[in-house]
Image (tube, rainbow, N blue to C red):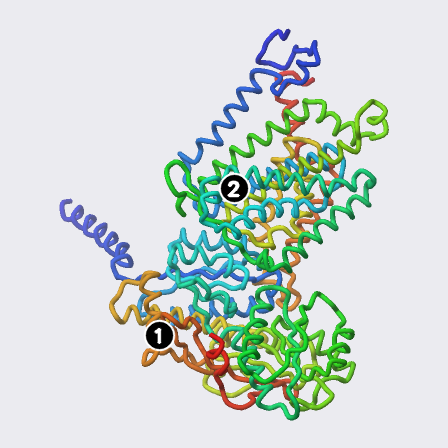
Amino acid sequence: MSANRWLATGNYFTTYKEEQRIFFTALDRLICAFFLTALFIWPFFIELDSKDMLVIDNILVAVIAILGLNLVTGFAGLISVGHAAFVGVGAYTVACLSRVIGDQHVLITHAWPLMIMLSGCVGAIFGGIVGLPALRLKHLYLVMATLSFQMIFEWTIGFMNFFNQGQTIFVGRVFWFTGQVGRKEHYLFWYYALLVAVVLCAFAVRNLLRTRHGRCLVAVRDNDRAADAMGMHPGFTKVYAFALAGFFAGIAGAMHAYLYRGVGMESFTLHHSIQYLAMTIVGGLGSLSGSFFGPAAIMMLDLQVEKLAEWAVHFLPPGMNLATALRPLSFGLVIVLFLMFEPRGIANWWRILRSYVKLWPFRY
Amino acid sequence: MKTYKISIWLLVSLIAFMLAMPASSGAKVYKLGLSLAITGPTSDAGNPYAKGVEDYFRYVNDMKLLGNDTIDCTIRDDKYETAITKRNFEEYLDMGIVFYLNYSTGSTLGLKRDFEEVKMPVIPASFHAGNLEDSNYIFLPIASYSAQAIGLAEYVVKNHKGKTPKVALFVHPSAFGRGPVEDVQKAVAAGLGMEIVEVVEHGKDLDNTAMLQRLKSKDVQYVISQTVQSPVAVMLKDASRLGLVAKTFGEKGKITFMGCHYTGGNDLVALAGDAAENYYWTTSYIITSEPGVGTDAQLALAKRYGRDDKFANSHNYANGVMVAQVAAEAIKRAKTRGKEITKEVLYEELLAMNGMNAFYPVTTVGPVTFSKDDHQGVDTLQLYAVENGQFKSVGMPFIPEYTGKIK
């Protein structure tokens, strides 16, 4: 057993069970508890306006989606460029029900946690179906399969009257124990709802990675033939990786629908799929912490570039529309720079920082 | 010593009084918000639109049209994305705006519920008739796309010689483009004597040869477009290359191309060049290639604030100026009545803008009239056609008949 349960220094794992612990030291647990408490109580002390709360809520929605994408792409090594479509499946599950039974129906407004779970399940089903080609396809060919799903999704939503041809389908305001969640508290309410969802999803992923199924994902990513030889089922593993990614994406989509109180096609395009991939790469492929850093970094970058473009448009020649190019340019540049100089993403910086703090005051 | 102390206190009091002066002078600042595509898709229209709004409000403040009160209109780029528009709108609400100017069809439809909830009067740059469905607070500045398309169709029926004219609709693949299709079909069902042969939803094609040949093989003589300039320019260039563009209206064996507000203007001529000749276009705005009071006012405003020729002559600049005129007029009228400027009061002012109280901005071909049942500002349309690289008026301003018949 460890000499000091608060410090990592001098602690050695003597059983596999110890190695699989969520928190290695009591200090880790305390820091996590402190951090979570801070996340839950800061709105009592700092009042943010609706716009900023919406930005934070958006980051949390993306975190849930990226947790899923990281499972399929980061841990299982299966590149998916149709993730926004899976998020869209979740959002349109709520939207379709809203259209069929009415957006003020009790199922939509009161049973919203159930609706979110249902959307996750629908996302998982679609994920599983789209994952089926992974039984036979790999690498670029699998990318094409997921891309085709994105295209089919966009076409279906954009042209079918049932989906309002991609225009907004409204979703009613939800109810909580205190009554209807009004406009004033809307974004704060969804901040808490999203935070709870993020914590639950993150612990679910962390726990999954401690199980046999989680280790199968990594084993299949590293060498699926070796994994097969060791008794794992690579095909099944790939399909459930897609299903799990679809589940998280579905939850993110449903929460996006409730957050915006409506669903429109333009939030689930190929551009968004690429953006999700960028978040995963920048955050750190195959790392849990990367799923938090990626969305925050990309969305904050997006906001800053937005401001820059708005400012630059007054100075750049209008005919060339250079300000419009700033956004994709900076976006592409960040991805390329990360791939070249820090392929392990921001999560690696976090790892370096943590190992430094762990060893402190010793250098090594 | 005592006198010195008193002098110091007097001086301090005087300074304090002077500092307090601006606050007690009674000058008010009315906050407005505009969210539109300054960058991204359709920014070619959004940029001059934003400048139009900005310049007119600067003019109102500089010329003290509201006395000492001023308008502070914050303009934000939304990149043509509803999510960003929503964020901008939330920011504006936190700022305490009393009037909101929106831009795209998608975001206007997407934020409709928000406008209803906060009871915010809104004028979008989108003239989609669907904006007005289940909505009390959205006001279209001019006749809807549907009215424009029906107006063009009526012109075809009135001026076509021979059998029933065969028409194709060329539309943007979105609510913005699809909106008028159903209404034109309804007008045909209600007795408008023409045949809709095909409805083409264009993609991002850079060549329309196949589509044009198909339309030709179906004896289509007129194409009515409801989209933006670039796809129309591509179509016109291809039609010109194939020798399909009618030299005169309704020329037999050729196709006459026509379009709604966002398909035309100087940008189309710049994009399509000679192929734009004889392109028929309708809008409710005046254009600077036609002399008049409105043209002079628009060019003077643009010159006053140092805008280049491209902006000064843009119909989207006129579009921006006009919505700013309507907002400023509503504030002015409410002030004249001695009312406090709130969103509720401005909403009431807009509803009262009819009959003797109709507003005549010189930037449009007709008066702005709103009422509880009519949220379309300028009902009158003007037809223009390209002659020698410039849009020129064709006939007098008109109001489409079938818009009323299909209601």
Q: Is residue A60 left or right of residue A240?
A: left
Q: CA distance from mark 1 to mark 2?
A: 41 Å
Disc 1: which residue = B353
Q: Position of residue B275 (x, y in %)?
A: 71, 82
Q: Position of residue A163 (x, y in %)?
A: 59, 56
Q: Please tell me whether residue B91 is drawn above or below residue B269 in the rendered image.
A: above
Q: Please tell me whether residue A193 is drawn above or below residue A203 in the rendered image.
A: below
Mark 2 is surrounded, within 10 Å at the Cα level, by few (under 14), some (14 to 19) or many (20 or more) other residues, namely some
Q: Residue A25 is drawn in which quadrant? A: top right
Q: Tag count in the figure?
A: 2
- Residue A312 at least partly seen: no
The amino acid type, in three-letter code, at marker 2 is Ile
Q: Residue at x 64, y 53 (%)?
A: A327
Residue at the left extreme, as displayed: B2
* The label number, if any, that marks residue A56 in the structure image: 2
* The label number, if any, that marks residue B52 in the structure image: none
Q: Residue at x 27, y 71 (%)?
A: B336
Q: Is residue B356 left or right of residue A260?
A: left
Q: Is residue B6 left or right of residue A158?
A: left
